[in-house]
Each structure stands twice: as C-alpha cells, then as structure tokens.
Amino acid sequence: MAGWGAPIATVVLGGIYGPYAPDLINSFTAILRAGDQLMVVPPGGTTVIDVRDVALLLTRMVESDNYVPRLLAGGRFIKWADWVVALERTPGHAISTQRVTTDGLLALAKELTAAASPDELPALTEEAAMVMISGVPLDDHAGLARSGVALAPLDQTFADVIAYLRTIGRLPRMGCL
C-alpha cells in the first residue's frame, strides 16, 4: 500500500471484547475460563474495548480526510478484581475466584504449561500470565475524541459477549455465567 502512495497508520488496541469473533481467543479465553473453571485474580488489570467501538474507530480513520498516522485505543482500564465483579453483574451469578500474587500467577502458569498434553493448550500460559500482570492504563482520550468515538458501557459489552457465547453454544444458559 505504501508503495502505491497510500498512507499507512498504526493502531494500538487494548483487550478487544464483544460479539461476533472469528475465533474464541484472547479476551474470550478469560471469560470462558471464568465461566467453567476458576478465575485467578492477580494484582493489576487489563484494558477493555468493545469490538464495535474498534470497528467504528477504524471506519472513521479510513473515511476521514485528516490522516492520522498513529492511534492508541486501549479502552477502559479495569483491575482484575473489578473485571470479575463486572462480569458477575451480567448473569447475576458469582464466579469462582482465587486471588494470587504476581509470582503465584507465574508459577501457576508454568505448572499448567508443564501439565498440559502436547495436543492441548494449558488453561493459563506463561505469555497470558505476563499479559495479565503487565496491564497499564492507556491515555487514549485524544484519539477517541478526535474520531468522535465514545466507549460502550462495560456492562453492555460484557452482556453482549455472554449472549453471543450462549448463542453459539459455548456457555450454558444456566450455571456460573
């Protein structure tokens, strides 16, 4: 594209949540694990941005007459303990949790990785553990405002994710989530 004279833009996104994903990885993994196993709650937090906000943001970037070479769109920063509380509000059911230290989370990830069979992914990888403990708030207000994008409410994003996962048969209608 750059060879044809088209501008190139870099977009840095936070944890993308929302319905209609081509596969159930990354942010979906945390929700599915919280629903059918146990949610470990380390210190720190994560960013949450609704996939529809991302779609609107990208559309506005492409359609704009004003070239934006870089855009940061992390979404809301939420501590892991608050993430669990927000997720619990959606179905109104408690999620089984275990608070862990940073070192405890890394040790658990190593144990789960070692215990997983070669043909299955561990419930928590070392890479995922590192992502969970290294999240920081991102100051994306200027980019979102410039694009005229207001973030969807967290509760709405989580409700739509849960509804989507139920629709495709990945979450039962009853139970934890």
Image: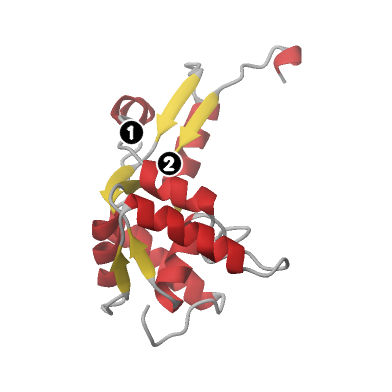
In terms of depth relative to the viewer, which is nearer, 56 or 10?
Answer: 10
Is the residue 65 above or below the residue 99 in the image? Answer: above
* Kind of element beneath mark 2: loop
Residue plotted at (67% across, 16% down): 6
Q: Residue at x 70, y 16 (%)?
A: 2
Q: What is the spatial separation of the Cα atoms under label 2 and label 1, in whole angstroms? A: 8 Å
Q: Are marks 2 and 1 in contact (CB under 8 Å)?
A: yes
Q: Is residue 41 visible?
A: yes
Determine the image quadrant of residue 76.
top left
Q: Residue at x 37, y 78 (%)?
A: 177
Q: Which mark is residue 138?
A: 1
Q: Is residue 5 left or right of residue 9?
A: right
Q: Amino acid at mark 2?
A: Gly
Q: The disc labelled 1 sits on which kind of residue?
A: Leu
Disc with the residue nearer the chain's start (2 vs 1): 2
Q: Residue at x 29, y 47 (%)?
A: 44
Mark 2 surroundings: few (<14), some (14-19) or many (≥20) residues within 10 A: many
Q: Point out which mark residue 49 bears.
A: none
Q: Element type at marker 1?
A: loop
Residue at image mark 2: 14
Expressed as whole percent of the image width and height from the top left, the position of residue 171 reads 48, 78
User: Does residue 19 show up?
Assistant: no
Estimate the x, y position of residue 62 in percent, counting from the top left: 55, 28
Give residue 143's position: percent from left, percent from top.
36, 26
